[in-house]
Amino acid sequence: MDRVELEEAVRRARDLVTDLRHEAGAIAESTAAGPDDEHDVEGSSIGFERRRVAALLSQVEASLLGLEAALARQLSGEYGICGSCHKTIDPERLAALPTAELCIDCARSRPRA
């Protein structure tokens, strides 16, 4: 991914974070009138929607952090360089995972937490 593509991905992720925060706020406002969290015959419960939006927001915020870090590496000239062995990360890996900080060999050898 080049700088322009990373900047666009960061912008889209930021917009999505903003939208999800607004959605979470709207859900909170809708429940402020009372504790009615019963299932709506026509749809899902407010509790379900709250958890769904919270989970999506958490995922998008994590993605945004990774994209911002990738953009910082792009701007510093370190994008596409493995943070462990300092070899070039395969462009196909970066195309599939633009936030990759490690080449595939280093990523495979790193113990999982």
Image (cartoon, rainbow, N blue to C red):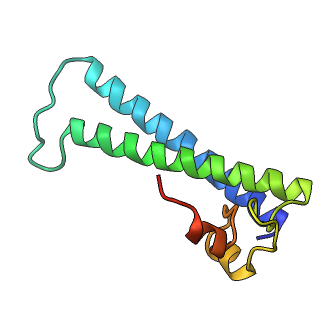
Residue 25 picture location, percent across and down: 42, 29
Count the labels in the image.
0
Residue at the top extreme, as displayed: 33
**Above or below, comparing residue 31 to residue 10 in the picture:** above
**Above or below, comparing residue 26 to residue 6 in the picture:** above
Residue 6 picture location, percent across and down: 75, 61
Q: In this view, does 113 lie to the left or right of 73?
A: left
Toward the viewer: 44 or 13?
A: 13
Residue 24 picture location, percent across and down: 41, 34
Residue 17 picture location, percent across and down: 55, 43
Identity of the residue drawn at 52% across and 49% down: 60
Identity of the residue drawn at 31% across and 37% down: 50
**Above or below, comparing residue 50 to residue 42 in the picture:** above
Identity of the residue drawn at 34% across and 26% down: 28
**Quarter of the picture holding the N terminus:** bottom right
Q: In this view, does 96 lie to the left or right of 73?
A: left
Q: In this view, does 14 lie to the left or right of 8?
A: left
Q: Is residue 8 left or right of residue 46?
A: right
Toward the viewer: 17 or 63?
A: 63
Toward the viewer: 41 or 20?
A: 20
**Above or below, comparing residue 69 to residue 5 in the picture:** above
Identity of the residue drawn at 81% across and 63% down: 79
